[in-house]
Image (cartoon, helix red, strand yellow):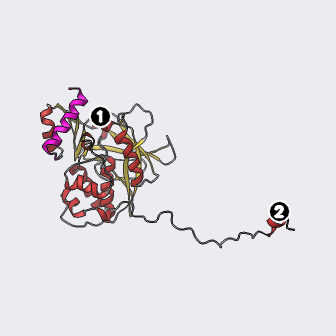
Amino acid sequence: MATYENIQDTKPTPRPGIAPPPPPVFTHHDFWRGGELDLETYLERLDLDGVTPPPPTLDTLVAVHRAHLASIPFENVQLLLDRPVLLDVPSLTDKMVRGHRGGYCYEQNLLLAAALDRLGFTLTAFSARVLMGGDGGPRPSTHALLRVDLADGPWLVDVGFGGGGLLEPFPFVDGHQISQDGWDLRLDRIAEVGDEEWLLRWFDGEAWRNLYSFTTAGNLPQDYAIFSHYLTTHPRSPFGNRLMVARTVGGTRYALTNTTLTIDRVGADRADPSGATLEREVRELPMSEVGKVLHEIFDIRLDQDERAAVEERVRGFLDM
């Protein structure tokens, strides 16, 4: 009769090289769905329809980034209209390209990711902790940005940060500092949370201000869908309790919060950041001008019913 010890002794000894190689983790790698983007219409929206498609070079990346930022505003009107925020490429195209609307970070940078993917760029998506306006304490990662890899190295791109940030791609280099149309920006590697954490900040003429920190762990659109659901449904989310609109055109930044319109302007040729000058104009709009400003300054096209709905929500926010 075989004993337990004898059975154990007769088991085959595993030998290396017998098992086949494991299959890929994912069944497909079409993460950014560039093929679903109407590229020609997107480039027309950006006034970049002279060459279709432009080559995947740094010059193209700079041109697309600047034009996207200037043409497609940051805004949260969808939530004020009680409509869902959809992140699939066809929905983003219908809303932001054909519909002459804008969006917030996940919408903006996922649309840009689809365009860059379609143009032949290689990219990775990150999540960031927004630090601007905070008290110095840590915040959850609720912002999206991208890294694009070119032959000369990686570049950060971000067209969805409504509070300022990049005008054009930024070299992904520790300690790099540059002025983009008068806006001074700096990127540093830090170790507040982990070894692969980075901080982007800007100089306001008096001091360096933190914009956001991020890690280099890659994200996918599925991750952003979860983050976006949180931001659009949580009762304390800043996107659900005020009208927020922003647009950056070179050295001029426009921002509308409820009925407060702020216009910031900086000079474009400053050799010394310590000599920065920032001109700020603040105007309080009557409610009757909100829809007009949305159209004329931010190029957000709403019909009469949509304007009325937005104005009604803003009245509620201001307890008017």
Which residue range is magenta in the image? 301-320
Pinpoint residue 72: horizontal percent, then vertical percent: 23, 50
Name the residue type under label 2.
Answer: Tyr
Q: Residue 158: x and y, percent? A: 33, 50
Alpha carbon separation for disc pair 1 and 2: 69 Å
- As drawn, the residue found furthest toward the front would be 1
The residue lying furthest to the top in this view is 320
Residue depicted at 27% across the width and 34% down the height:
242
- Spot occupied by residue 43 in the image (x, y as percentages of width and height): 22, 60
Picture quadrant where residue 208 is located: top left
In the picture, measured across the screen, residue 244 lies left or right of residue 8, that is left
Mark 1 belongs to which amino acid? Asn
Q: Residue at x 23, y 45 (%)?
A: 248
Q: Is residue 151 above or below residue 186?
A: below
Q: Earlier in the sequence, mark 1 or mark 2?
A: 2
- Mark number, residue 4: 2
Decide: few, some or many residues near mark 2? Use Cα within 10 Å; few <14, some 14-19, many ≥20. Answer: few
Is 204 left or right of 21, judged from the image as shown? left
Q: Is residue 250 left or right of residue 17?
A: left
Label 1 vs label 2, nearer the camera: 2
Which SS does the magenta portion mostly show?
helix
Q: Quadrant of the C terminus?
A: top left
Q: Quadrant of residue 3?
A: bottom right
Q: Are marks 1 and 2 in contact (CB under 8 Å)?
A: no
Residue 154 magenta-highlighted: no
Residue 309 disc label: none
Is 310 inside the magenta-drawn segment? Answer: yes
Residue 199 seen in the current view? no
* Badge number at residue 241: 1
At 80% from the left and 65% from the top, the residue drawn is 8
Q: Circle 1 — which element? A: loop
